[in-house]
Amino acid sequence: METMLSTPVKLSATAVIEFKRLMNEAGFDQEQYLRIGVKGGGCSGMTYVLGFDKKEADDDIYEIDGIPVVMKNSHGIYLFGMEVDYSDGLNSRGFVFKNPNASSTCGCGSSFGV
């Protein structure tokens, strides 16, 4: 298993804290990685993928602030330079994607156009 040195995405400090909290929950499968990616769909054409998953044969592996991350190599062109943030405010709570490659985004923030 080879870990890449440069990462196409960044995690904010608050996102790192939340991911580590989730990874330290009782019953978390320590063999899972944080998967960041995209898939077709959503109101703007592409939808973000974010969750814990097993590594697949065509995944690139990264380590970001101690968090093991997997991503399909082909997703890098859509996500390069993106930051995953975590908001814990009263009006919105959850992960937020700040993607400089998105030519358009939807109101919910979970899909984008390129």
Image: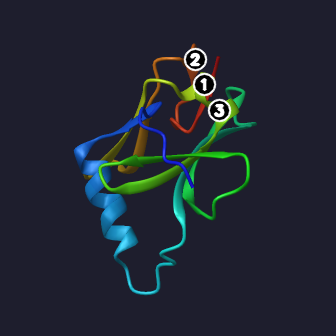
Rendering quarter of residue 76: top right
Query: Does label 2 or label 3 sit earlier along the sequence?
Result: 3
Rendering quarter of residue 106: top right
Return the residue at label 1.
78
Which percent across, then down, holds residue 110?
A: 56, 39
Q: Which residue is rendered at x = 55% and y = 58% of the image?
A: 51
Which element type, helix, strand or loop, lies under badge 1? helix
Return the residue at label 2.
104
Q: Are marks 1 and 3 in contact (CB under 8 Å)?
A: yes
Q: Is residue 21 left or right of residue 94?
A: left
Is residue 92 depicted above or below 108 in this figure?
A: below
Q: Nearer the viewer, residue 98 or 71?
A: 71
Q: Which amino acid is tagged 3?
A: His
Q: Which residue is rendered at x = 70% and y = 36% of the image?
A: 42
Q: Which residue is rendered at x = 57% and y = 17% of the image?
A: 104
C-alpha separation, residue under disc 1 versus residue under disc 3? 6 Å
The answer to whether one can see residue 88 in this image is no
Which element type, helix, strand or loop, lies under badge 3? helix
Return the residue at label 3.
75
Which percent across, then down, holds residue 107?
A: 52, 31
